[in-house]
Amino acid sequence: HFNLEFNIIVELYYKNELAYFNSGFYPFIFHN
């Protein structure tokens, strides 16, 4: 698990900038 700050930053970034990527790779990394 990542730090809460980092998790929020990355989550916001990828949901806005790379939403298509977010649904493919990042959920199991940043959302667990």
Image (tube, rainbow, N blue to C red):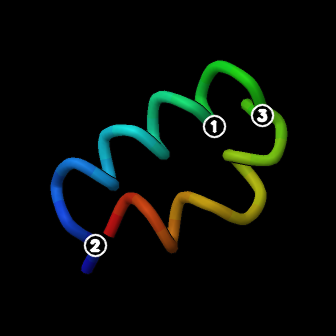
Label 1 sits on a secondary structure element that is helix
Give the CA distance from mark 3 to mark 2: 19 Å
**Is the residue marked by circle 2 packed among few (<14), some (14-19), or many (20+) residues within 10 Å?**
few
**Is the residue marked by circle 1 packed among few (<14), some (14-19), or many (20+) residues within 10 Å?**
some
Residue wearing tag 1: 14
Q: Position of residue 23 (x, y in %)?
A: 70, 47
Q: Residue at point 78% right, 34% down? A: 18
Outermost residue to the right: 20
Which residue is more in the foreground, 32 or 14? 14
Question: How many discs appear?
Answer: 3
Label 3 sits on a secondary structure element that is loop
Q: Residue at point 51% right, 71% down? A: 28
Residue 13, compared with residue 25, is above or below; it is above
Q: Position of residue 19 (x, y in %)?
A: 73, 31
Which residue is more in the foreground, 6 or 30? 6
Residue wearing tag 3: 18
Q: Position of residue 14 (x, y in %)?
A: 63, 37
Kind of residue indicated by mark 1: Tyr
| Direction from residue 13 to residue 23 in the image, left or right | right
Residue wearing tag 2: 2
Kind of residue indicated by mark 2: Phe
Kind of residue indicated by mark 3: Leu
Residue 3 image-quadrant placement: bottom left
Which residue is more in the foreground, 9 or 27? 9
Q: Position of residue 2 (x, y in %)?
A: 28, 72
Residues under numbered marks 1 and 3 in contact, where contact means CB atoms less than 8 Å apart: yes
| Direction from residue 4 to residue 11 in the image, left or right | right
Pointer 3 or 2: first along the chain: 2
Q: Residue at point 32% right, 54% down? A: 6
Residue 15 image-quadrant placement: top right
